Image (cartoon, rainbow, N blue to C red):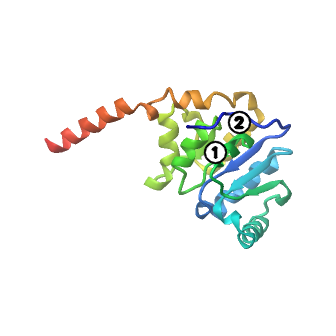
Amino acid sequence: SLPEIKKSPRDFISFGSFNNIAKLTDEILIAWSKILNRIQNSKLIIKAKICNIQSGREILLARLNRLGLPIDRIALRSFSQNYLEDYRDVDISLDTFPYQGGLTTIESLAMDTPVITIRGNSHGSRFGASILTNSNLSELIAENLDEYIEKAIDLAKNSDRIKDYRSRIFRSPITDSKQYTRDLERCLLQIWN
């Protein structure tokens, strides 16, 4: 079962990414830098297995620094068994690009944390858009990198809109297993015929 949602009290916006570190391209990290620079006092939490070892943390921090991210506003967190509870410290999740989060996106929404994503042109770059569309959250989908940055900034500046994602995802088609099964059966019958 999911842990209780109890966002940590804070007077700043906290962005986060719990995606596999291999998905962090220079392009997306530079976009995150632009977001952080435009939202005063904002922070970024990166949670990944590479942060479990000191040399991994040092390599990641050196890369972030080289790309111009404000290191003093970034928290690196190690992987943990109770990682879903860390979403309490995140207001907005930032999806990776071009290869996006699948389960990570669903977990973020289930922990009442919106995810900003980009709709790409290939299978691996359309996970986020597919999940958000089927969760009735298409307003969180950007069509390009500039729009991604603007959507993240707009949501951060209008933080009163950050609410009820857990209830929305559990009322959406993405969690309707009966309809999914009926649709799959219909597709299999079409293939058979």
Tell me where residue 106 sits by quadrant: top right
Q: Amino acid at mark 2?
A: Leu
Eye-nearest disc, 2 or 1: 1
Tell which of 154 and 86 is nearer to you: 86
Residue found at x 47% / y 35%:
134
Q: How many numbered marks have been drawn onto this rendered protein structure?
A: 2
- Do labels 2 and 1 touch, CB within 8 Å? no
Q: Name the residue carrying label 2.
A: 155
Q: Which quadrant holds the C terminus?
A: top left
Label located before the other in sequence (2 or 1): 1
The residue at the far left in this view is 193
* CA distance separating discs 2 and 1: 22 Å
Q: Residue 67, position in %: x, y? A: 75, 65
Q: Secondary structure at mark 1?
A: helix
Q: Which quadrant holds the N terminus?
A: top right
Q: Relative to 169, is 30 above or below?
A: below
Tell which of 120 and 8 is nearer to you: 8
Callout 2: few (<14), some (14-19), or many (20+) C-alpha neighbours within 10 Å? some
- Residue 143 can be seen in this image: no
- Residue 3 can be seen in this image: yes
Residue found at x 43% / y 53%:
123
Q: Name the residue carrying label 1.
A: 84
Tell which of 41 and 49 is nearer to you: 49
Residue found at x 32% / y 35%:
181
Using the image, tell me which numbered label, if any, was put on residue 35: none
Q: Residue 60, position in %: x, y? A: 72, 67
Residue found at x 29% / y 38%:
184
Tell me where residue 76 sits by quadrant: bottom right
Q: Residue 189, position in %: x, y? A: 19, 39
Q: Residue 37, position in %: x, y? A: 81, 50
Q: Amino acid at mark 1?
A: Leu
Q: Secondary structure at mark 2?
A: helix
